[in-house]
Image (spheres, rainbow, N blue to C red):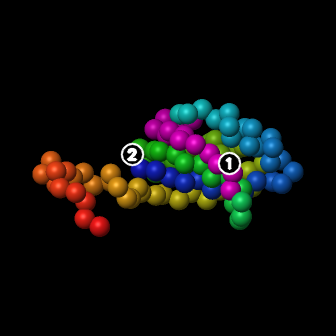
Amino acid sequence: MPEYLVLMKLNPGKIVDTLGDIRKLEEKPVSGVDLCYSMNIFGSWDVGMWINAENSSQVLEFVQKKIKNLNGVTEVYTVPTFPHGPGVKSRSAEEQKRPLET
């Protein structure tokens, strides 16, 4: 399932309340979307949220219906991502017998 990073800017006067509302979101806030976790970010953005979704239309529904309606969210930027690194490509049984080359 594709992964998405949802970045949010918050109204400085409502940060505590908005973070509380984000933490109260369900694990499956809309059909086809799984909320993995959220995190505070220091810099241009205030909060990041990793989600999994079956397709981009479900992500749009989640952002429009759940995130943009949270009191205190002033801006949202959604980034489709894909995993990389160990474990992404399965090694065949023969390859697994040999050590990884460095």
- Residue 15 is situated, as x and y percent measured from the top left of the image, at 80, 48
Separation of disc 2 and disc 1 at Cα? 23 Å
Residue located 35% across and 55% down the image: 86
Q: Is residue 33 magenta?
A: yes
Residue located 81% across and 54% down the image: 11
Residue 68 bears which disc, if any? 1
SS at circle 2 = loop
Residue 29: quadrant of the picture:
top right
Which residue occupies the foreground of this view, 41 or 57?
41
Which residue occupies the foreground of this view, 11 or 98?
98
Instruction: Give the mark toward the camera: 2 or 1.
Output: 2
Q: Quadrant of the C terminus?
A: bottom left
> What residue span does the magenta drawing correspond to?
29-41
**Mark count:** 2
- Residue 42 is situated, as x and y percent measured from the top left of the image, at 71, 60
Residue 16 bears which disc, if any? none
Label 2 neighbour load within 10 Å: few <14, some 14-19, many 20+? few
Classify residue 94 as left or right of residue 22: left
SS at circle 1 = loop
Is residue 75 visible in the rendered image? The answer is no
Is residue 12 visible in the rendered image? The answer is yes
Residue located 75% across and 38% down the image: 20
- Residue 52 is situated, as x and y percent measured from the top left of the image, at 47, 45
Residue 99: quadrant of the picture:
bottom left
Q: Mark 2 is on which residue type? A: Met
Which residue occupies the foreground of this view, 91 or 53?
91
Q: Mark 1 is on which residue type? A: Lys
Which residue position holds label 2?
1
Label 1 neighbour load within 10 Å: few <14, some 14-19, many 20+? some
Q: Quadrant of the N terminus?
A: top left
